[in-house]
Amino acid sequence: MAETTIPDNALTSILDALDKANARVSAQFPGDSPARQPVHTGYGGAHLFKADAASKLGARGAALAAGACAGRGHVRRRARTRPGAGATASTCA
């Protein structure tokens, strides 16, 4: 019957090669950022979305955030929703 175990010297060589490859991949793709990440996703058919869908959703979210922060003594930051659009939204900072 044939050997079913990898010899130690072959296993060491294989694991060394994998360690090097894993280090290169980890350096190139470090993983998710620990910074804030988006938590909402909108799903719908293409017929539901128009050119202004993103700005409408952003304005609605900003309005909800502004309402959630109101009266709580939060520091507020004003940010333009689109350059030159003139619309602003207050968000908790």
Image (tube, helix red, strand yellow):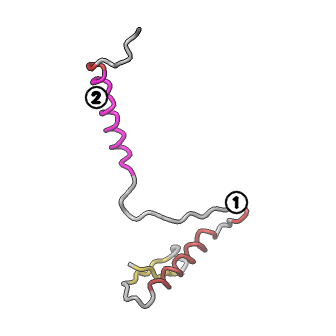
Image quadrant where one finds the N terminus: top left
Instruction: Say if the magenta span includes residue 29.
Output: yes
What residue is rendered at 37% in x and 85% in y? Answer: 74
Looking at this view, is 42 or 9 the one in front? 9
Q: CA distance from mark 1 to mark 2?
A: 49 Å
Q: Position of residue 81 (x, y in %)?
A: 51, 75
**Which element is circle 2 on?**
helix
Secondary structure at numbered mark 1: helix
Q: Which residue is mark 2?
A: 16
Outermost residue, bottom direction?
A: 71
Where is residue 22 drawn, in percent x and y? 34, 37
Q: Tell me the residue that label 1 is attached to.
A: 46
- The prevailing secondary structure element of the residues shown in magenta is helix
Question: Splitting the image into 4 quarters, where does residue 51 fall?
Answer: bottom right
The residue positioned 63% from the left and 62% from the top of the image is: 43
> Relative to the observer, which residue lies in front, 6 or 52?
6
As drawn, is 93 to the left or to the right of 80?
Answer: left
Residue 53 placement, left or right of 58: right
* Residue 72 picture location, percent across and down: 40, 88
Numbered-mark total: 2
**Label drawn at residue 65:** none
> Range of the magenta residues?
11-31
Residue type for callout 1: Ala
Outermost residue toward the front? Answer: 1
Q: Would residue 2 be counted in the magenta stretch? A: no
Q: Which residue occupies 55% across, 73% down?
A: 58
Q: Is 30 positioned to the left or the right of 52 in the image?
A: left
Mark 1 or 2, closer to the camera: 2
Amino acid type for the residue under numbered disc 2: Asp
